[in-house]
């Protein structure tokens, strides 16, 4: 008999341990983009967006935290023209889409001009010292005052961080023609993330349950590079980082969009606990087949399509698909229901509510 009094954290961790849960845990994942959130706010009659944020958060079994940045002023800042520079020196410019929707697209790749390893030595690489880890316990208490939710922090995206600095096209060329140069960057990025997580998790003293790592290694129709290149040049760094993370007792939720089903065995060998995003709109990404191939060895987070289902289906179709995914991916445990990415501008609020109502009827009914 199930214990109906289990906390959200207990239910999330049961799912990640492939145990049958009294209800399927739910996560908002990458959240709701602002235009869609404002439309939902208007639909619900909320007085401001904070009320809508609180409403959405009430359905989410996971809380996300990070140590505050205390590094140099020329990094991790917004520029007067609206562009923003991150800790790696990558600059992004806001680009408008669908009325008021905005994505921050990279407009400056700081390592694009590097031609050899010597060009990289003088770069101002970020330091793990740029974060206030001592503030993390308070951040966790603020995010989850009653201590009932699963706590997650991130983000260890080794390949992505590299190409953000180098440029995607140049990075793909480097994988074949300049592997030593790229390997230098991979090592620097991996060393940063490992030290960052070491300090954060040591300070949190067991209060962090999940570490979110990432690398989009696939597109709509298949892998971005050959599986062998990914397996030999990128995967070893994630495997090294994952082994370190597991030493702290956390679960690892790894994000990749796209048609990555062909490397599912490599993902398992990489040492992750869950595959996040699960973009079932991509070629060959069949929920039943993936569950059959990896269920019991990989947990899953995502699957509720932000590409086709939520923006274009009817509320009834959303209800049916969410129920199908819960039955399929949640069979014998191992599923956290979630959108496959950020819910996009133009998504009808009725469909967002249909997803929430179906995934968390216990909240809706209250």
Image: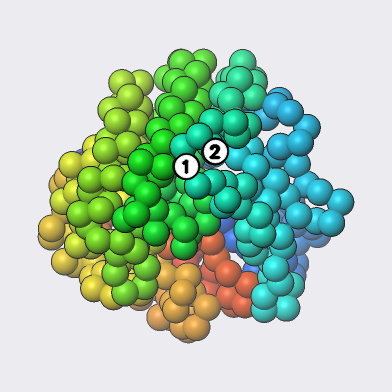
Q: Which residue lies furthest to the right in this view?
A: 80
Q: Residue at x 53, y 74 (%)?
A: 351
Left or right: 306 with respect to 5?
Answer: right
Whether residue 62 is situated above or below residue 328 in the rendered picture: above
**Badge 2 is on which residue?**
119
Whether residue 114 is situated above or below residue 49 in the rendered picture: above
The percent position of residue 259, horizontal first and vertical second, equals 30, 67
Q: How crowded is mark 1: few (under 14 residues within 10 Å), some or many (20 or more)?
A: few
Number of numbered callouts drawn:
2
Q: Residue at x 49, y 52 (%)?
A: 163
The percent position of residue 279, horizontal first and vertical second, equals 36, 66
Q: Are marks 1 and 2 in contact (CB under 8 Å)?
A: yes
Between residue 335 and residue 167, name the one nearer to us: 167
Q: Residue at x 46, y 62 (%)?
A: 169
The percent position of residue 141, horizontal first and vertical second, equals 60, 25
Please tell me the numbered disc located at residue 36. none
Q: Taking the image as drawn, is residue 38 in sight?
A: yes
Q: Taking the image as drawn, is residue 151 in sight?
A: no
């Amino acid at each position: 008999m199930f214990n109906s009094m289990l906390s959200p954290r207990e239910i999330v961790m049961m799912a990640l341990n492939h145990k049958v849960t009294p209800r399927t845990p739910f996560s908002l994942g990458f959240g709701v983009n602002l235009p869609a959130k404002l439309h939902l706010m208007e639909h619900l009659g909320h007085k401001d967006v904070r009320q809508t944020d609180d409403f959405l958060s009430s359905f989410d079994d996971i809380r996300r935290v990070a140590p505050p940045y205390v590094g140099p002023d020329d990094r991790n800042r917004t520029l007067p023209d609206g562009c923003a520079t991150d800790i790696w020196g990558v600059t992004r410019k806001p680009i408008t889409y669908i009325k008021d929707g905005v994505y921050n697209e990279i407009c400056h790749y700081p390592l694009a001009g590097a031609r050899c390893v010597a060009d990289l030595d003088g770069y101002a690489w970020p330091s793990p010292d740029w974060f206030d880890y001592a503030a993390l316990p308070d951040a966790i208490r603020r995010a989850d005052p009653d201590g009932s939710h699963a706590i997650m922090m991130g983000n260890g995206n080794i390949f992505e961080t590299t190409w953000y600095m180098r440029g995607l096209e140049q990075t793909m060329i480097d994988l074949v023609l300049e592997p030593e140069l790229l390997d230098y960057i991979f090592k620097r990025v991996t060393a940063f993330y490992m030290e960052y997580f070491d300090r954060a998790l040591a300070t949190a003293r067991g209060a962090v349950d999940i570490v979110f790592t990432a690398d989009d290694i696939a597109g709509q129709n298949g892998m971005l590079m050959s599986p062998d290149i990914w397996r030999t040049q990128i995967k070893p760094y994630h495997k090294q980082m994952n082994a370190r993370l597991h030493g702290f007792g956390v679960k690892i939720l790894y994000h990749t969009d796209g048609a990555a089903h062909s490397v599912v065995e490599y993902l398992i060998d990489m040492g992750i606990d869950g595959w996040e995003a699960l973009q079932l709109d991509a070629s060959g990404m069949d929920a039943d087949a993936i569950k059959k191939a990896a269920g019991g060895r990989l947990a899953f987070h995502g699957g509720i399509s932000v590409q086709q289902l939520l923006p274009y289906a009817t509320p009834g179709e959303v209800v049916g698909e969410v129920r199908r995914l819960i039955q399929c991916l949640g069979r014998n445990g191992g599923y956290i229901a979630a959108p496959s990415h950020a819910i996009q501008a133009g998504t009808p609020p009725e469909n967002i509510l249909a997803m929430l109502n179906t995934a968390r009827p216990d909240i809706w009914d209250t």
